Image: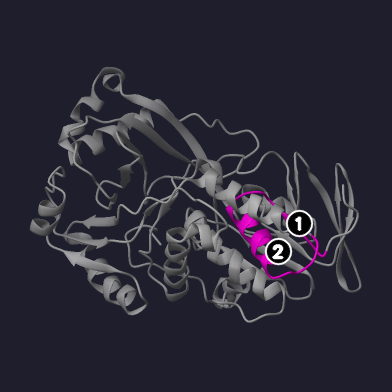
Amino acid sequence: MIGRADAVVIGGGIMGASTAYFLSKLGFGQIVLLEKKRLGAGATGYSAANVRQHYSNEIAIRLAVRGVEMFSNANEELGGPAGFVQCGYMVIATERDEPALRTLVPLQQSLGVQTRLLTPDEIAELYPALDLEGITLGCLESNSGYADPLLTVHTLVEAARANDVRVYEGCQVLAIETDGDGISGVITGDGDISTRVVVNAAGPWADRVGSMVGIDYSLSFSREHEALFQTPPELTALPVVADAEQRIFFRPQGTGQVLVGQSYPKEREPCDPETYDDRADPPVVDSMVERLARRVPALGHLAGVDYGGMLTTSYSGVYSITDDWYPIVGGEPGLPGYFAAIGGSGHGFKIGPPIGESLAATIAGDTPPLDLSPLARARFAEGRAFTTLWNGNRG
């Protein structure tokens, strides 16, 4: 274990890997990345990794637009492949949610999102495999899609290692030390590191890391279920589809597979990230499959006994959720050298790289590509929490 570092990043998911990589690109000095288990073992490893730009506030939209740029040019921007598939992202809605689409799409377009409204007839022409009963409007982002979460993290980490970042897996942080000047060190199970900068990117464990320096984060945790199925070869190509009415999303996974997952609003399933069951609950999978089959009739056989023998895998991950469903990012008043990139709330993967890029610049004292101040923890006390036009929280 190295004894001194210019910055210690805690957490080997998308936020931590991105921040460590971009700090190293800026030449910040000796960077250390600590992961208590293995890279991507927390929320990132279970992420659906949908890369979309459909948000309802300026900072999230700008981060998402930058995220698509980065995933689209991963070799240059992220240091290697991210497995990005640019299949498009489409929201479909009933009359109840039409106002949200008609309000948000012009805002998104004004901030650089390549999106457009679609009538049901236009959707049917593009994607004839969909049953659009009840759908009155949609919007399509042609340059969005999905990526490979573990590949992305490993790409960032390997690129960081090439810049001399020290990476320690299986290394648990036990305490963070402070003195009169702020952060002074990190104590781990493998040794102590003297440092003046700590980045809390610990995902579902971020509240526990925050408590080491007296910060009480308001985070809640919920299991989120997904399932992957084989599909018939004749099924036409689909984008990532957010079905607002049925509260599911689904998308292709490579060729010959479809991934389906839960979407909000839904009842939270509180859990402990240390002990939760990462297997998907069969009743939840059954419910998702029934709704998927209604929307894609060619997948009706999945609703049969044992899913027609087409189930590839199913699992559950953990969302770490802030009070307004947006990440907490930035420094902490009164604690020099402490920074956070936590509370992904289901958004973390797609905006993790641009958050890491701008947070690294902030730490280094440079002008960040994007102003992250709207994501500061102080927003809750100052009445600046985010809201949404959607029924339930969709971002």
Residue 321 appears at what percent x and percent y?
Answer: 54, 54
- Determine which residue is flagged by label 2: 24
Q: Is residue 395 left or right of residue 103?
A: right
Q: Is residue 146 magenta?
A: no
Front position in the image: 5 or 124: 5
- SS state under label 2: helix
Residue 49 appears at what percent x and percent y?
Answer: 45, 49
Front position in the image: 197 or 17: 17
User: Residue at coordinates 58% horizontally, 53% vertically from top-left?
Assistant: 14
User: Residue at coordinates 37% horizontally, 77% vertically from top-left?
Assistant: 111
Q: Is residue 125 left or right of residue 179?
A: left
Q: Is residue 313 left or right of residue 24?
A: left
Please indicate, yes or no, whether residue 323 appears anywhere in the rendered image.
no
* CA distance separating discs 2 and 1: 8 Å
Q: Quadrant of residue 121?
A: bottom left
Asked if labels 1 and 2 touch by Cβ distance under 8 angstroms, the answer is yes
- Determine which residue is flagged by label 1: 164
Residue range (magenta): 6-30
Q: How crowded is the residue under tag 1: few (<14 C-alpha within 10 Å), some, or many (20+)? A: some
